[in-house]
Image (cartoon, rainbow, N blue to C red):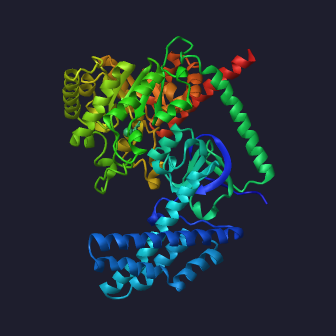
């Protein structure tokens, strides 16, 4: 029998095949997957270990409370331990595992749901309270199952395809990059932060596969085609051979591209488009050849903060920034000020729950309110500035006041450093991200007060079209080729040209080679993309004359529909391919 292919949304290119590891996103979102008959004992063993760990933890809490508070308050933990010893409940969970062949966490979740349904529906607050009480120790078992599982997989060496309910930044960084073959998920849009991160790390990725987790078993082999957005469950030998041969072909094309990547992206009529890279962490520096890029166009510093358990000190940040600058050896490095909030939470920095996180407390709004965060980061950046060509980028700018406040703090920080005898670079360029509509509409004034701009199309598209970039229900409405997006991009490029300021695009759309050509035609002076896209973009730019790129831009601007804009992008692709075949034919 042939393995089944299912279609999802292609989020990050590349082909990979390997065993699945299902990531648990949290107790309220417990994934269910099927287990093979021979895994039943293993799953029951996992359950037993988790129950022992939960029981030990309850005893520990009892001891702690009875010494720090009083014996009476500590009693509840003894009761919870007894609840876990109920043989009836244990039998129920074990038989779900064995008879329905589901994973232990799903079986425990089922028991909790049963408690709530049977007791939660009964009249009276005390009965409902009892339902909460009997479920509580089982929730702890769930936590134990999940954290133990994570510890176990982290200790292993094997490479896996991660599967999850949703592709979040947490999932994308769940294991070291070298151990992740690919990621597949039920939910998640192309431009969610998790997807952006996966692309930056070059992890093949497919999202939007309905009912994915119940179809998986831990360690089941799947093939992931991140180019076409397909996944293949349990490929048969012949299917696997076809898949691997495609993978080999793709690798050999990449090799050709790599050979060209040493050249600059100069059009046949002699116009250069610097291609910079977006990076998320210092580890990324080892994943690409610095000589093949024109610099770092966007370092998302928030990811340096995410991989930790507390805010990095000024000294730690300074060392990190200096390392990046030294690594880039005189090429520009654009460090973006912290852009946390929304779906980029820090585990150690609690922000209040929000109805509309994308419109809420994020980016510069947080750092202007908690200005110590900003001051420490600016101090670290300024101290690192003599080590290279550093530029600073402000995220989520919505008004001139924000820019002026940042400049004010920047001047104070610089004066303090001068007084303290630190060497810093004068005239450090400070730029603004253009990613909210007010910054586009007020662009003329904004560009006059900064040294450069960089367009964050991931956010700009969501705010222009009122479509949440992380909401799978509206993922198909998130349309970077919408004519309004093209017009906004043109308006920014023209405004920057008139003000004599460089303008770049660092949102993910620039990673598509045809779009990069279009952006050059619109008047952008550079693009910044995930490192793995650099060779393809150089290849395309080197084949399309700048005058043709301008004509394509005019044509795109004349379109009334997204389809029309996509048609223009296809023409660019055809011309790139045509150039290649005529070169080969000559
Ligand atoms: C963007 O919004 O396009 C961008 C580059 O920033 P981020 O994806 O980190 O919000
Ligand atoms: Mg953004």
Residue 323, position in %: x, y?
Answer: 43, 27
Direction from residue 449 to residue 83 in the image, left or right: right
Q: Quadrant of ligand 2?
A: top left
Q: Residue furthest top?
A: 270
Viewer-nearest residue: 84 or 564: 84
The image quarter containing residue 422 is top left
Residue 298, position in %: x, y?
Answer: 42, 31
The residue under the point 18% across, 28% down is 408
Q: Residue furthest right?
A: 238
Q: Is residue 387 above or below residue 26?
A: above
Q: Is residue 475 above or below residue 540?
A: below
Q: Residue furthest front?
A: 67
The residue under the point 31% across, 87% down is 124
Quarter of the picture holding the C terminus: top right
Residue 243 makes an appearance in the image: yes
Direction from residue 108 to residue 380 in the image, left or right: left
Residue 102 makes an appearance in the image: no
Residue 5, position in %: x, y?
Answer: 68, 54
Quarter of the picture holding the N terminus: bottom right
Viewer-nearest residue: 477 or 231: 231
Number of numbered callouts drawn? 0
Direction from residue 36 to residue 113 in the image, left or right: left
Direction from residue 376 to residue 568 in the image, left or right: right
Viewer-nearest residue: 239 or 151: 151
Q: Residue furthest bottom?
A: 123
The image quarter containing residue 66 is bottom left
Residue 44, position in %: x, y?
Answer: 61, 72
């Amino acid at each position: 029998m042939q393995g089944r292919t299912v279609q999802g949304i292609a989020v990050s290119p590349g082909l990979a095949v390997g065993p699945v590891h299902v990531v648990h996103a949290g107790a309220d979102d417990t994934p269910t997957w099927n287990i093979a008959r021979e895994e039943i004992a293993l799953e029951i063993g996992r359950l037993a270990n988790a129950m022992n760990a939960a029981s030990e933890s309850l005893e520990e809490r009892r001891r702690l409370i009875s010494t720090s508070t009083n014996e009476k308050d500590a009693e509840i933990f003894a009761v919870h331990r007894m609840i876990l010893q109920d043989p009836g409940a244990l039998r129920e969970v074990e038989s779900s595992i064995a008879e329905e062949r589901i994973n232990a966490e799903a079986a425990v979740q089922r028991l909790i749901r049963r408690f709530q349904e049977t007791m939660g529906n009964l009249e009276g607050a005390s009965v409902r309270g009892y339902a909460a009480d009997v479920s509580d120790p089982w929730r702890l078992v769930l936590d134990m199952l999940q954290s133990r599982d994570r510890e176990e997989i982290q200790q292993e060496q094997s490479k896996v395809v991660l599967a999850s309910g949703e592709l979040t930044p947490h999932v994308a960084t769940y294991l070291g990059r070298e151990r992740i073959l690919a990621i597949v998920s039920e939910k998640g849009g192309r431009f969610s932060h998790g997807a952006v991160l996966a692309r930056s790390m070059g992890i093949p990725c497919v999202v939007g596969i309905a009912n994915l987790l119940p179809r998986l078993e831990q360690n089941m082999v799947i093939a992931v085609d991140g180019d076409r957005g397909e996944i293949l469950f349990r490929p048969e030998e012949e299917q696997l051979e076809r898949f691997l041969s495609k993978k080999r072909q793709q690798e050999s094309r990449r090799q050709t591209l790599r050979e060209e990547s040493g050249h600059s992206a100069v059009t046949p009529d002699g116009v250069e488009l610097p291609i910079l890279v977006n990076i998320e962490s210092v580890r990324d520096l080892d994943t690409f050849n610095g000589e093949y890029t024109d610099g770092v166009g966007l370092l998302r510093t928030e990811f340096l903060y995410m991989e930790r358990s507390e805010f990095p000190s000024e000294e730690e940040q300074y060392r990190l920034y200096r390392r990046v600058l030294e690594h880039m050896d005189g090429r520009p490095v654009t460090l973006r000020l912290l852009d946390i909030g929304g779906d980029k939470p820090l585990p150690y920095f609690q922000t209040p729950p929000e109805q509309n996180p994308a419109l809420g407390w994020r980016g510069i709004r947080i750092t202007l309110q908690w200005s110590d965060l900003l001051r420490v980061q600016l101090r670290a950046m300024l101290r690192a500035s003599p080590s290279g060509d550093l530029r600073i980028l402000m995220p989520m700018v919505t008004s001139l006041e924000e820019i002026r406040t940042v400049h004010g703090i920047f001047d104070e920080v610089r004066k303090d450093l001068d007084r303290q005898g630190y060497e810093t670079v004068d005239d450090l360029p400070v730029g603004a991200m253009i990613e909210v509509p007010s910054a586009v509409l007020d662009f003329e004034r904004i560009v006059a007060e900064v040294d450069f701009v960089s367009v964050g199309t991931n956010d700009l598209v969501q705010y222009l079209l009122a479509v949440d970039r992380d909401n799978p229900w509206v993922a198909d409405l998130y349309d970077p080729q919408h004519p309004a997006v093209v017009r906004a991009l043109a308006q920014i490029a023209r405004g920057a040209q008139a003000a004599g300021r460089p303008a770049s695009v660092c949102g993910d759309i620039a990673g598509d080679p045809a779009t990069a050509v279009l952006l050059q035609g619109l008047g952008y002076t550079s693009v910044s993309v995930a490192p793995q896209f650099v060779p393809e973009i150089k290849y395309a730019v080197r084949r399309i004359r700048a005058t043709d790129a301008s004509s394509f831009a005019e044509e795109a601007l004349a379109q009334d529909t997204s389809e029309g804009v996509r048609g223009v992008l296809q023409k660019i692709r055809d011309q790139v391919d045509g150039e290649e075949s005529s070169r080969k034919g000559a």
